[in-house]
Amino acid sequence: MEIIDQHQTLLYVLALAGGLYMTWGIGANGIASAMGTSVGSGVITIRQAVVLAAIMEFCGAYLAGGEVADTISTGIIDGRLFEPVPHLLVLGMIGALLAAGIWLMVASMRGWPVAATHAIVGAVCGVGVAALGVHAVHWEMMGEIVATWLLSPVLGGTVALLLTMSIRKLIFNTVNPIARARKWAPMYVFLVGWMVSQVTISQGLKHLNIHFHVFSAQLLAIVIGVVLALAARLMMSRIQLDERVDRTFQLASVERLFIPQMVFTGAAMAYAHGSNEVANGIGPMAAAIQILVSREISADSPITPFLLLLGSVGMVAGLATYGYKVMATLGHKITELTPTRAYCATVATAFVTVAASGLGLPVSSTHIAVGAVMGVGIARGIGALDLRVIGGIIVSWLITVPVGALLGAIIFHLLNTVLA
């Protein structure tokens, strides 16, 4: 406790700086999973993607980002073991933020789509072991988190594959694909709007002290979904196409009709990414600040609107700087994307990510996105995938956890040596 009393202001500044640095890395690297498919399909430009993602990532992080933060900040290491030495937990959380931020910065500069969740969880484990030994880590919680990592690409790929097959059956393999696209596409937009709205209303807004009854929340989510579907239909009606042309031209026209849908789904994906990934930065930061303010370790670290706002700002800054490098990797190199394929991958990623965020599961949106793009490619056969690129991405996933743990342990020892 003496160390906290002596260096409270410095530790507070380091915690805020570490959280901001970590969320900057999340923005710089996570933009690939949020907007890579939209850019890769040629629907929007990189500049447009950064602007759209900046707005929606901010909204997702601020309105629906608190649930997962509780898991990151309190569930990985045993806070009770740190009660006699709370300063070690403060130094550990700061060290974890700096370690994960460093790795994300390196990966972003190289264009590697690594998972921020991997980096911070590995770093938290590393500082826990470095501080008090292997017994300080909740390995059963780690097992659950690792299971979500393994399940993430499978879920993303499965949902994307089902969506691709449904569009093929309901639209492409019909007598009049253009007419069918005008009929069914708004329904897909409704599903996106309903899902994102439902999770935001029921889970995210409670962190802003805004509460809805279950029935009211469901009704509001349905209304938002219907409004978005009507807006999509209106946008599609402005695209004039001749339905009497040959079939090849009709199929190409269907791709044009799905371009407006990608505006909605790209925004939903950015929102979903923000709601899940901001927790990786503000969770450890909240734990450190809670100890500095209360001088005790609590089972729950309050995720205040200010911390969510700070994390949102950090992510937006990351998107505007190095996000384009990772975006190019995911958007072009795994498989060839068209508007409808990108649409299926983006919707699948948004669905799985937002649902996991609402359940408090720190899944990797990068894993989900890669799995979704693979699912879209599998619909056309394994030959449509670049297995060498996929293999490289998987290797980057595997080394992120140990690298994060090693960096976390090193930075923790440095901080403890300097301040102890």
Image: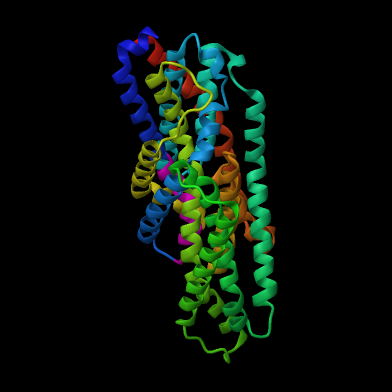
Query: Does residue 256 lie above or below 287 as drawn?
Result: below
Res. 321 in view: yes
Instruction: Give the residue at x 58% y 92%.
Output: 244
Residue 267, position as x, y percentages in the image: 46, 59
Q: Which residues are magenta?
A: 26-43
Task: Choose between 270 and 289: the one closer to the eye.
Answer: 289
Quadrant placement of the N terminus: top left
33 within the magenta span: yes
Q: Residue furthest bottom?
A: 244
Residue 386: percent from left, percent from top = 60, 54
Q: Position of residue 280 (x, y in %)?
A: 48, 36
Identify the colour scheme used: rainbow
Quarter of the rendering occupied by the C terminus: top left
Q: Residue at x 46, y 24 (%)?
A: 407
Q: Main secondary structure of the magenta part?
A: helix
Total tally of numbered discs in the picture: 0
Residue 332 horizontal/vertical position (percent): 50, 57
Residue 113 showing in the rendered view = no
Q: Is residue 381 magenta?
A: no
Tell me what residue is drawn at x 47 percent, y 50 percent.
Answer: 32
Q: Residue at x 61, y 44 (%)?
A: 391
Picture layout, residue 20 above or below residue 153: above
